[in-house]
Image (cartoon, helix red, strand yellow):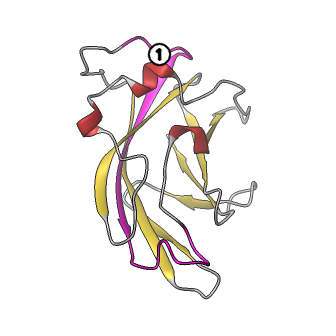
Amino acid sequence: MSPRGNVVLTPGEGTGIENGEGELQASFVVNSITVDAPCTSPDAELPENGHFVTLDVSVETTPAVGTDDGLSSFSMDPYNFKPIAANGTTSNADPSSIAAMYCYEEAQMLPSSIGPGEKATGLVVLDVESPSGILVFNDLFSMHGWEWAY
């Protein structure tokens, strides 16, 4: 656990979200993290905050997603992330900028909503101020948090 109470992971390490009865609802892996990868979309813009951090993510949900006591869908949108610079300063800048949304073609991006019994792989792009630090992901449903160094 980190000092912030989050599970610390490295790229390639999987984790999951369970419902109140301990039933797995979604598992996910950040396969890789790349800082300042060139955008490939024809509509690409420069980062608004300084640097793009691209996460290659794989997700698999179970049929338990959508049950009364569980997730309605899994989402790993940029607005669920909090970047923390290498010096420990939490960023006030929004990592879910318009520039981050248009860095890659939509077909390359992780779907914004992954429903029951689905598998998805794609990119999540964050617009951050610092070229190194910690990325904290908070799942709003389960109130759990995970973090990766970048």
In the picture, residue 120 is in which quadrant? Answer: bottom left
In this view, the residue in front, 122 or 11, is 122
Furthest toward the top, the residue is: 46
Left/right placement of residue 14 relative to residue 137 reads: left
Q: Is residue 7 above or below residue 150?
A: below
75 in the magenta segment: no
Measuring from the top left, give residue 24's x and y in whole percent: 48, 80
The residue at the point 57 percent across, 74 percent down is: 70
- Which stretch did the figure color magenta? 45-71
Q: Is residue 23 above or below residue 51?
A: below
Left/right placement of residue 67 relative to residue 114 reads: right
The residue at the point 47 percent across, 16 percent down is: 47
Query: Which part of the image, by quadrant, shows the N terminus?
Result: bottom right
Measuring from the top left, give residue 46's x and y in whole percent: 42, 11
In this view, the residue in front, 78 or 149, is 78
10 Å neighbourhood of mark 1: few (<14), some, or many (≥20)?
many
| Residue behind mark 1 | 47
| SS under mark 1 | loop
Q: Is residue 122 above or below residue 84?
A: below
